[in-house]
Amino acid sequence: MTDDDQGESPRVPPKLEHPPVAAPTVDRGRCDQCGYLLKGLPGRGNCPECGSAYTPESAARLKPWPSVMMICLSLGWPLFGLIFFGAISFVEYANLLACYGYPMLVAVPVNSYFQVRWMLKHHLPEKKRTEGFIAGFRALGTVIALLIFLLTITPLLLFGACLVIMAGSSF
Ligand SMILES: [Zn+2]
């Protein structure tokens, strides 16, 4: 209203209270709770979409999804290993399949479980990861991975049990 106010406001704009040096903007981070793109926003603050607080670290947690090729490789390497050792065991070295094929077989459920967990953690916003059908799929996936794991180590357990029984009966 006064000449004083009008004269002062252009000289002291409110944004100067937080120097830009102390609050670098987020280049391409995402809100790790809802996935909102935080591009151009201050390094720390609250997500405009869901209101969750974010930091440069949390904004950097979510990465773009890897290519289909990378997903196939990270999930499928034990299978590729199995196929590889299966193929060469047909040719000559059958013992290789027993030595390396079996660990690969056990690695299928273990690797899948941890790879999927890692992927969901780094590529899916927290709210999508822990709610709704994704949470259901995660629970289902955990059960399936556990079942396959138990299935693959059953021969080893049986073998171990046989050895114990045989060792026990020989005395
Ligand atoms: Zn958000």
Image (cartoon, grey):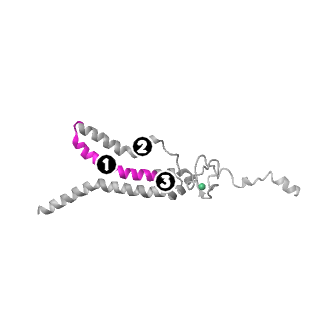
Is 100 contained in the magenta span? yes
Instruction: Determine the CA span between mark 1 and mark 3.
Output: 25 Å
Task: Give the class, few, some or many, for how many residues have Cα within 10 Å of label 1's Cα (few <14, many ≥20).
Answer: some
Instruction: Determine the CA span between mark 1 and mark 2.
Output: 16 Å
Q: Amino acid at mark 1?
A: Leu
Ligand 1 rendered quadrant: bottom right
Is 115 contained in the magenta span? yes
Q: Determine whether, in the image, residue 55 is placed left or right of residue 146.
A: right
Q: Residue furthest top?
A: 91
Residue at (42% x, 50% y) in the render: 115
Q: Secondary structure at mark 3?
A: helix
Residue 157 placement: quadrant: bottom left
Task: Give the class, few, some or many, for how many residues have Cα within 10 Å of label 2's Cα (few <14, many ≥20).
Answer: few
Residue 45: which numbered mark, if any? none
Q: Determine whether, in the image, residue 51 is placed left or right of residue 105.
A: right
Distance from mark 3 CB to nearest ligand 1 atom below 8 Å: no
Residue 138 in the image: x percent, y percent? 45, 56
For marks 1 and 2, the one nearer the N-term is 2
Q: Which residue is mark 3?
A: 121
Q: Secondary structure at mark 1?
A: helix
Q: Quadrant of the C terminus?
A: bottom left
Q: Who is closer to the viewer here, 78 or 39?
A: 78
Q: Determine whether, in the image, residue 53 is placed left or right of residue 84.
A: right
Residue 64 in the image: x percent, y percent? 52, 46
Q: Secondary structure at mark 2?
A: helix
Please name which of the two marks, 1 or 3, marks the residue nearer to the observer. 1
In the rendered image, the vertical position of residue 156 relative to residue 101, given as above or below: below
Q: Which residue is mark 2?
A: 72
Residue 76 in the image: x percent, y percent? 38, 44
Q: Which residues are magenta?
A: 91-118
